Amino acid sequence: TTNALYLTDRQGLPLAISTPVAGNHHDLYNIEKSLNELFTTLDMANINTDGLFVNPDSGFDSKKFRKTCHKHGVFANVDFNYRNGEIDDDKLLDEFLYKERSSIERTNAWIDSFRTLINRFDTTLSSWLSFNYISFMVILLRKINKNKKYR
């Protein structure tokens, strides 16, 4: 399997993807590099990250994750991971915004509907990334087409 970090907007439209890593790594593996890559992609697309909220699950509750987000002006709205053993009351959590996390779960389900991405038939990283970008485009086109039907 392959793991990659996806960044979506509130509607679940994919905005950026990190370079994938082998599936035997946890989500926080090389997190600074992955986040820097995601935020650089947004910068290249002229999407301002200052004041942006990200709502990852509690598996991303780490000092490195929060520090890297803060460095880019991004508010890490991460639920507390009680397995870490540290509950810091100084960390803020907007529970209303945190419920919006379902948009990334929906996007993951959409991306999983592309069998090539699930099974990873291609052995090269560039092919796998390309199929991800194609899935991003298909998701966007479906969204645009859906909006046209209701006008």
Image (cartoon, rainbow, N blue to C red):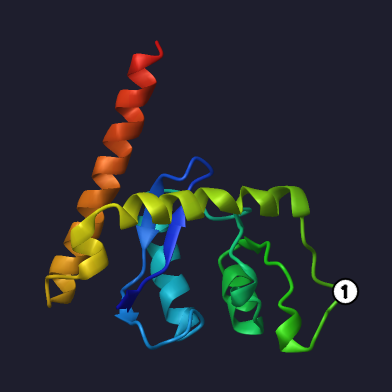
Amino acid type, residue under disc 1 in the picture = Asp
Q: Nearer the viewer, residue 25 or 90?
A: 25
Q: Classify 143 as above or below 120.
A: above
Count of residue discs? 1
| Quadrant where the image shows the C terminus | top left
Q: Classify 76 as above or below 94.
A: below
Rendered residue at 88%/74% (across/down): 89
**Residue 109: horizontal and vertical position, in percent?**
40, 53
| Quadrant where the image shows the N terminus | bottom left
**Residue 78: horizontal and vertical position, in percent?**
67, 66
* 61 displayed left or right of 107: right
**Residue 46: horizontal and vertical position, in percent?**
40, 48
- Residue holding disc 1: 89
Rendered residue at 71%/67% (across/down): 79
* 36 displayed left or right of 86: left
Rendered residue at 33%/81% (across/down): 21
Q: Nearer the viewer, residue 75 or 86?
A: 86
Residue 77, image quadrant: bottom right
* 64 displayed left or right of 37: right
**Residue 134: horizontal and vertical position, in percent?**
20, 51
Direction right: furthest residue? 89
Rendered residue at 31%/75% (across/down): 20
Label 1, secondary structure: give it: loop
Direction top: furthest residue? 151
Q: For mark 1, does the 10 Å Cα neighbourhood hold few (<14), some (14 to 19), or many (20 or more) residues?
A: few
Q: Nearer the viewer, residue 41 or 84?
A: 84
